[in-house]
Image: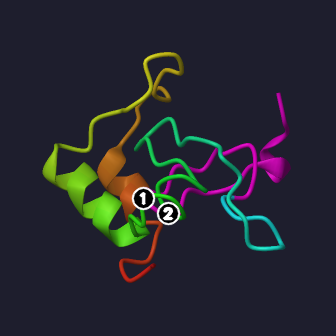
């Protein structure tokens, strides 16, 4: 597992433990799926044209449920606090 210094934050929900940056330096998507909100970089944004903000609004509307069945939510996970770490106006 990567060290915390190598982790990246989801621009949709604020999940702090992505293994790769959502977008590469060249601008392409990482294809990683956020285990918290289910957004897949390079597919939801590039192929489906779903913005970070639109997916965030849908995730919040649906109760901010943990998305992954294979990765468990962190102990004492607080989706409200996590969400407060991202700016609301992102693409």
23 is higher (above) or lower (below) than 26:
above
Residue 14: percent from left, percent from top: 49, 57
Task: State yes or no: residue 9 in magenta.
Answer: yes
Left or right for 9, reference 57: right
Residue 32 location (% of width, % of height): 64, 43
Viewer-side residue, 23 vs 87 = 23
Residue at position x 41%, y 36% from top? 77
Callout 2–callout 1 Cβ contact below 8 Å: yes
The span shown in magenta is 1-21
Quadrant that contains the C terminus: bottom left
Q: Few, some or many C-alpha atoms within 10 Å of disc 1 (few <14, some 14-19, many ≥20)?
A: few
26 sits left or right of 48 in the view = right
Measuring 72% from the left and 65% from the top, which residue is drawn there? 28
Residue at the disc numbered 2: 45
Give the overall secondary structure of the magenta segment. Answer: loop
Confirm whether the magenta stretch covers residue 24: no
Q: Which residue is mark 1?
A: 48
Assign a secondary structure to mark 2: loop
Q: Quadrant of residue 90?
A: bottom left
């Amino acid at each position: 597992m990567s060290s915390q210094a190598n982790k990246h934050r989801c621009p949709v929900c604020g999940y702090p433990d992505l293994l790769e940056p959502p977008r590469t330096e060249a601008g392409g998507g990482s294809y990683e799926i956020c285990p918290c909100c289910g957004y897949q970089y390079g597919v939801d944004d590039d192929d489906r044209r779903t913005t970070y903000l639109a997916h965030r609004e849908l995730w919040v509307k649906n109760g901010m449920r943990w998305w992954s069945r294979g990765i468990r939510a962190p102990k004492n996970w607080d989706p409200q606090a996590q969400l407060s770490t991202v700016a609301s106006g992102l693409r």
